[in-house]
Structures are given as structure tokens and as C-alpha cells.
Image: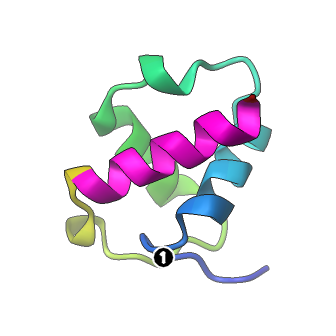
Amino acid sequence: MDELDWSDAQEIGYRLAEAHPDVDPLAVRFTDLHAWVCALEGFVGAPGDSNEGLLEAIQMAWLDERD
């Protein structure tokens, strides 16, 4: 399993789409999104290193994967 960090938005989006296929990414609060990303297998990013821009990029990547 490859390691993921906050900058890996596309891969994180893909994995979130796989893990939560029935969830609308636009309906997920950033606090929940942050927790779900941190809980992904292989995620090694420090929780405090995230920011709104990174979470938005992950959210958009997830939306792209879902659509």
C-alpha cells in the first residue's frame, strides 16, 4: 500500500469514492472529511498539516471520481 499525504488529492479522492460510494462529497463537512482522510489506510500526513484549500482539492477529486 502506497503512503498518502495531503498533497495526494486525486488518490485520496479515489479511495474515498471507493470507501463511501453512497456519499455526496459536497454534503460532507470538512471536519468529517478531515477525519475520513486521516483514517484511510496508508495515510501518513500529519492531521495539523491540512487546510481548507487541501480539503477542497480532495473534495473536488472525490466528486470527479464519483461522477
Q: Secondary structure at mark 1?
A: loop
Q: Is residue 48 left or right of residue 63?
A: left
Q: Is residue 63 left or right of residue 56?
A: right
| Residue 39 x %, y % | 53, 55
Residue positioned 73% across, 83% down in the render: 2
Which quadrant of the figure has residue 31? top left
The kind of residue on which mark 1 rests is Asp
Task: List the single residue furthest toward the bottom.
Answer: 2
Residue 60, compared with residue 26, is above or below; it is below
| Residue 37 x %, y % | 49, 53
Nearest the camera: 61 or 16? Answer: 61
| Residue 27 x %, y % | 44, 16
Residue 56, compared with residue 53, is above or below; it is above
- Magenta highlight range: 53-66
Residue 9, compared with residue 63, is above or below; it is below
Nearest the camera: 44 or 10? Answer: 10
Number of residues whose C-alpha sits closer than 10 Å to that of mark 1, classed few (under 14), some (14–19) or many (20 or more): some
Residue positioned 48% across, 51% down in the render: 58
Residue 6, compared with residue 40, is above or below; it is below
Q: Quadrant of the N terminus?
A: bottom right
The coloring applied to the image is: rainbow
Residue positioned 73% across, 41% down in the render: 65
Q: Is residue 18 left or right of residue 42?
A: right
* Magenta-drawn stretch contains 61: yes
Which quadrant of the figure has residue 40? bottom right
Residue under pointer 1: 5
* Magenta-drawn stretch contains 36: no
Residue positioned 73% across, 17% down in the render: 22
| Residue 67 x %, y % | 75, 28
Q: Most prominent secondary structure in the magenta stretch?
A: helix
The number of numbered discs placed on residues in the rendered structure image is 1
